[in-house]
Image (cartoon, grey):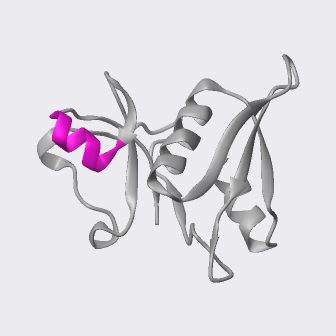
């Protein structure tokens, strides 16, 4: 998912289609709320369901400069509340899967929750 977003912005596409899953849709909604993408919506019916993401550009430059997947199937990375750190001095976000849902590092810190760090975006 993150590679599709980066590659789409590298060639100045307006939209990118990503195969649907619930976790990807929640991540896309977090990115939309934080202003990294314009919109994310579900399209189609099963089994060809996709997430259509409208990419965002600021002065001709992509809003997402870099993404990093932190937790992988072979190595899950968890964090506690006290170990949540800002990304790029507060200019980026990390997306965390908590017991209360998928949220940013800032939201998790104010809610007093830790969880699995899915990715970092800046």
Magenta-colored span: 104-112
75 drawn magenta: no
Farthest-out residue, left: 82
Q: Position of residue 96 (x, y in %)?
A: 37, 40
Farthest-out residue, top: 46
Which quadrant would residue 112 be assigned to in this image? top left
Q: Is residue 60 left or right of residue 118?
A: right
Q: Report the residue at 29% width, 67% height from top.
A: 90
Q: Is residue 82 left or right of residue 47?
A: left
Which quadrant would residue 18 be assigned to in this image? top right
Q: Report the residue at 26% width, 61% height from top.
A: 86
Q: Is residue 85 left or right of residue 38?
A: left
Q: Report the residue at 71% width, 48% height from top.
A: 53
106 drawn magenta: yes
Q: Report the residue at 54% width, 40% height from top.
A: 29
Q: Nearer the viewer, residue 108 or 78?
A: 108
Farthest-out residue, bottom: 59
Q: Position of residue 48 (x, y in %)?
A: 88, 25
Which secondary structure class fits the magenta region best? Answer: helix
Which quadrant would residue 63 be assigned to in this image? bottom right
Q: Is residue 59 above or below residue 3?
A: below
Q: Is residue 60 above or below residue 101?
A: below
Q: Position of residue 49 (x, y in %)?
A: 81, 26
């Amino acid at each position: 998912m993150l590679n599709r977003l980066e590659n789409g912005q590298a060639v100045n596409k307006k939209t990118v289609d990503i195969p649907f899953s619930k976790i990807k849709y929640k991540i896309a909604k977090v990115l939309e709320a934080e202003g990294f993408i314009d919109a994310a919506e579900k399209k189609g019916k099963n089994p060809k369901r996709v997430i259509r993401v409208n990419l965002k550009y600021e002065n001709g430059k992509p809003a997402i400069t870099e993404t990093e997947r932190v937790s992988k199937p072979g190595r899950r990375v968890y964090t506690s509340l006290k170990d949540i750190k800002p990304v790029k001095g507060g200019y980026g976000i990390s997306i965390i899967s908590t017991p209360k849902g998928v949220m940013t590092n800032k939201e998790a810190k104010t809610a007093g929750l830790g969880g699995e760090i899915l990715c970092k975006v800046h």
